[in-house]
Amino acid sequence: MSTSRTVRQIAKGIPTSDGAGVKLTRVIGNQYVKNLDPFLMLDEFKSDDKADYMAGFPMHPHRGFETVTYMLKGAFRHGDNQGNTGYLAPGSIQWMTAGRGIVHEEMPNQEDGPVWGFQLWVNLPSTHKMTAPRYQDVPPEQVPEVELEHGRVKVLVGDFQGVRGPVEDVVTDPLYLDFHLNDGASQAVKIPLGKTAFVYVYQGSAEIAGTQLPERHLGILSEGETIEVRSLAADTRLLVVAGDPIEEPVVQYGPFVMNTVDEIQQAIQDYNEGRF
Ligand code: FE2
């Protein structure tokens, strides 16, 4: 018999701003949930008001981890100091391995209208922190969607009932699923033993093993092999994310995430001297 995971901690997303003043909700990486190895940060950005997002995220560096952008509504474009550019349409996912360093910008590709999406930061182990940068830009039509008895799920990364998401070769072997569930729907989700796992309800309300998760709440899961999610609203939408913990020291200085203070100082020096 497989063991069920339960919710061991609930946390509400905290309103904040980042970049050049983009308003967002910080779900992981705030004062209550500092980090959730291997996950360093989860932001939800959602607004119908261009004043909340037009400033975007102008040129900034990253080293030592991966940034994952998943768009629900609206569009962003990105460009880096190596001449790489890309377009993030609604329903697309970008898995960016910053590795030894990139300098990029992430800016809205629209004048007004709604913007809604997520950015997740996933750590890299010491063996991979200085790897070559890599982009996996996945357009919406390449994200498989599985019809469920009472809803549907997009498989962004990892495996759901034998359907595999398009993002490959990630060292922490993650799972990233986006569920839409009808009222009262009950859905089992397999999450391999040993992985750090969480659920984020971004619309509606859900229950897991007797614990209710209202909208904009994170549920950090206990160890186990499966969860049973029940929707408590008409159109509940939630992310299920899991990954292998890295279990190494984390020294973070803004967009640099390394193992030691020396490595952070090296990152700052390399960036300042144009070696990214
Ligand atoms: Fe960035």
Image: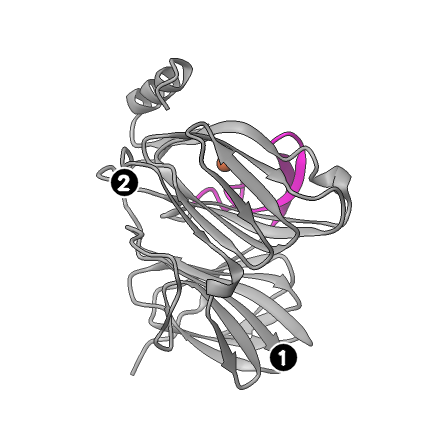
The answer to whether residue 73 is magenta is no
Query: Residue 273, relative to residue 233: is it above or below?
Result: above
Element carrying mark 1: strand
Q: Nearer the viewer, residue 266 or 170?
A: 170
Q: What amino acid is found at the position of numbered circle 1 in the picture?
A: Asn
Q: Is residue 59 left or right of residue 169?
A: right
Residue at the spot x=27%, y=45% of the render? 247
Residue for badge 2: 248
Above or below residue 194? Residue 36 is above
Q: Are marks 2 and 1 in contact (CB under 8 Å)?
A: no
Q: Is residue 105 visible?
A: yes
**For the point 36% across and 48% down, which residue is it?**
38
Image quadrant where residue 182 sits = bottom right
Q: Bounds of the magenta span?
A: 13-35
For residue 252, say whether it is visible.
Answer: no
| Cα distance in 3D space between marks 2 and 1 | 40 Å
Residue lying furthest bottom: 149
| Residue 158 left/right relative to 230 | left
Q: Is residue 251 left or right of residue 42?
A: left
Please give the residue where the numbered disc 1 appears in the rendered image: 182
